[in-house]
Image (cartoon, rainbow, N blue to C red):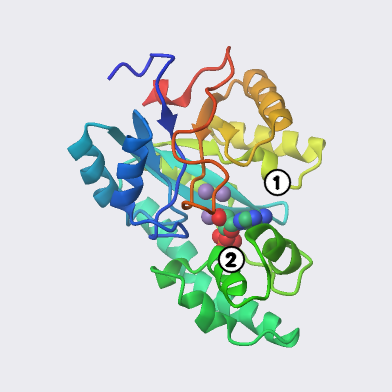
Amino acid sequence: MDLFSSVLNCDLHCHSICSDGLLPADAVARRAAANGVDLLALTDHDSLDGLHAARAAADALGMTFINGVEISIEWGGLQIHILGFNFDAADAALNGGLAAIRSGRIARAQRMAADLERVGIHGTFAGAMGFAANPSLISRSHFARHLIESGVCKDMRSVFEAYLIPGRPGYVEHRWATLADSLSWIHQAGGIAAVAHPGRYRLSRGDMRRFLAEFRDLGGEAIEVMSGSHTPEHIEVYARLAKEYGFLASRGSDFHGPNESYVDLGRLPSLPDGLQPVWQAF
Ligand code: AMP
Ligand code: MN
Ligand code: MN
Ligand code: MN
């Protein structure tokens, strides 16, 4: 495939049941192909489990597939997500690092459930686990689905706002990997690193610039300019910052499942003109 074509439909950010998505990895790949995606990366949170099945399904349909992952890190007290692309999925440092992140998730979920008990919401650990096909990837999304199903909140937006973001009763501080860890794992495995959905973080402009400079100085290559969670203003701001910092630009829906995600696989607008697509480096 000609990765320099400007008309490629690339979707480099999505999830399967191996983390907090709603579809099996092979079904994600089939849905992407049906939606006209030319190049897909599956980027489950902190897990490489779905890559094999997604690749096999993509191969069967003639869609190009590259390995991906979305790594949870902590920077400046915030949870930030770093995407890794096109790495060797057998790399020991990357697999060891991701296993270390996963090992903290169950204890964190127990603390979240204990916090929710204190505000009178019972049984959320078991409830959230009921939604987690992969218990080692238990996440806030699974708590959210349980709290909606049990009638505590009406939708994803309100459940995060009421219970699952900093300052709310179900949110607990957690130590994830560092920015330097995530970049060294991705790079040791031969991959390329991108900042996921930069518009989503509650960073001041100055702190965002400090973060991007640190990411660049540690060898980070790309930022997600087109994301399912970006507003038109975010797209403008991050297109400008990509040019200023010399970052490659990425495009990803962040699809988690039908009826839950704002944007379906492959259904984002194209990258703005004047940016260098990250897939040209694959
Ligand atoms: P965790 O990795 O357990 O902290 O869970 C984070 C996940 O929750 C993200 O990957 C998203 O899928 C989801 N999420 C985070 N914030 C929101 C939000 N405001 N609305 C909907 N989903 C969210
Ligand atoms: Mn997620
Ligand atoms: Mn994310
Ligand atoms: Mn994501």
Q: Nearer the viewer, mark 1 or mark 2?
A: 2
Q: Residue at x 70, y 46 (%)?
A: 201
**Which residue does the numbered mark 1 point to in the structure image?**
201
Q: Is residue 23 visible?
A: yes
Whole-percent x and y of residue 217? 60, 32
Q: Amino acid at mark 2?
A: Arg
Vertically, is 231 above or below 122?
above
- Secondary element at tag 2: helix
Asked whether the residues under the numbered discs 1 and 2 touch, taking CB atoms below 8 Å apart as contact, a structural biologist would say: no
Q: Is residue 176 visible?
A: no
Q: Amino acid at mark 1?
A: Tyr
Q: Nearer the viewer, residue 217 or 247?
A: 247
Whole-percent x and y of residue 203? 77, 44
Q: CA distance from mark 1 to mark 2?
A: 16 Å
Characterize the local packing of mark 1: few (<14), some (14-19) or many (20 or more) Cα atoms within 10 angstroms: few
Vertically, is 256 above or below 274?
below
**Which residue does the numbered mark 2 point to in the structure image?**
140
